[in-house]
Amino acid sequence: MTATQQLHARGQSLWLDNITRRMLDDGEIQHYIDSYSITGLTSNPSIFDKAIESGYYDEAIRACAAPDRSDEEVFFDLAIEDLRRAADLFLPIHERTDAVDGWVSLEVSPLLAYDTDATIAAAQSLHARAARPNLLIKIPGTAEGLPAITETVAAGIPVNVTLLFSADHYRAAAQAYLDGVQRRVDLNLDPAVGSVASVFMSRWDAAVADQVSAQLKDQLGLAVGLDTYRAYRQLLDSDDMQRLLNAGARAQRLLWASTRTKDPAASDTLYVHGLAAPFTVNTMPDSTLEAFHDHGEVGEPMPADGGEGDLMLARFADAGVDVHALAERLQREGAKAFVAAWKDLLERISTQRTALT
């Protein structure tokens, strides 16, 4: 049994953090499903930007890029077509797991991260256009995004809450989700709305790499992971969660994102074997997935009580790292990075359109 199969057997879902039309056409995504135990998929603007730069989408752009259509409209045409195809590949998993797994993700424009009403409208529009039951709409878990998450879930639209960095961010996102579910319960609507809460890991260690001792390098992300996983298990066991489950709701799953190791001196599977836990998701790029499949090891699962997370975080506090302040900074920087990547993507499409005409 391979490492990916072992991890899947332990109860963690492995999702691929990549999608291109070439991967769909060549059968690469189906291969990951068949041989690597991949049960879902996430995407982001940077992934599409690189794929469009390759020229593989030129004919598709030519076909849909009428002069009166914006670059953003062209992008969503391309992305929705790809994600529909991916969703269809994962649909058997989605049906077999009774909608627990088998999801793909499409995000709203990052330009809307601080505009609640526009985010709600975009989420509803994109989900309707995609017309797939196993498609999650990615909404940032910023302060302005949280009300949009509640409204979107209340409308019955599955959500991937993205851009989370800490246990506090996770709790806020989970509460926004539960508020939306409660609204559906109160209205006698089906409360089983799929959702994941995506917590970014590797950026923690990259942020403090130059200010901590060698003994603390590449440990902050895992410490935050332990703290967040404890908060997750506490919420799953809470009276509010149990009451909603009794009403037919689903639990929002915790998802580990940004799991590619950035330190070349560290293990290339650091944020996979270090974040193994049942009823969670780890979404990883091809290189990390291949590395774990090739030489990964599945150790003990994360402790539900957070294990040594508090002790590890205390060591960083002693070293002058304000974890709370850093989480807020990472979220702000993450939102800016998403916007920059989005603008790069739209500029790429504009350039391709010009060249093609």
Image: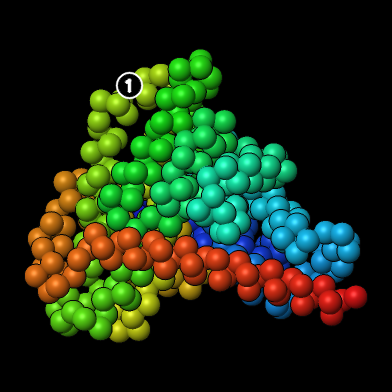
Question: Could you tell me which secondary element the residue under label 1 belongs to?
Answer: helix
Assess disc 1: are there few (<14), some (14-19) or many (≥20) residues with their C-alpha within 10 Å of its C-alpha: few
Of residues 30 and 247, the one nearer the viewer is 247
The picture places residue 268, in percent across and down from the top left corner, at: 36, 75
| Tally of numbered tags | 1
Amino acid on which disc 1 is placed: Arg
Of residues 85 and 111, the one nearer the viewer is 111
Image side of residue 120 versus residue 76, left or right:
left
Q: Residue at x 71, y 75 (%)?
A: 348
Of residues 96 and 341, the one nearer the viewer is 341
The picture places residue 254, in percent across and down from the top left corner, at: 37, 47
Q: Residue at x 30, y 84 (%)?
A: 265
Quarter of the image for residue 156 reads top right
Quarter of the image for residue 62 reads bottom right
The picture places residue 133, in percent across and down from the top left corner, at: 62, 37
The picture places residue 322, in percent across and down from the top left corner, at: 20, 66
Image side of residue 62 versus residue 264, left or right:
right
Quadrant including the C terminus: bottom right
Quadrant including the N terminus: bottom left
Q: Residue at x 33, y 76 (%)?
A: 206
- With respect to residue 218, does 311 lie above or below? above
Kindly identify which residue carries mark 1. Answer: 243
Q: Residue at x 58, y 59 (%)?
A: 111
- With respect to residue 203, does 9 lie above or below? above
Q: How is the image coloured?
A: rainbow
Image side of residue 227 versus residue 108, left or right:
left
Residue 152 seen in render: yes
Residue 282 seen in render: no
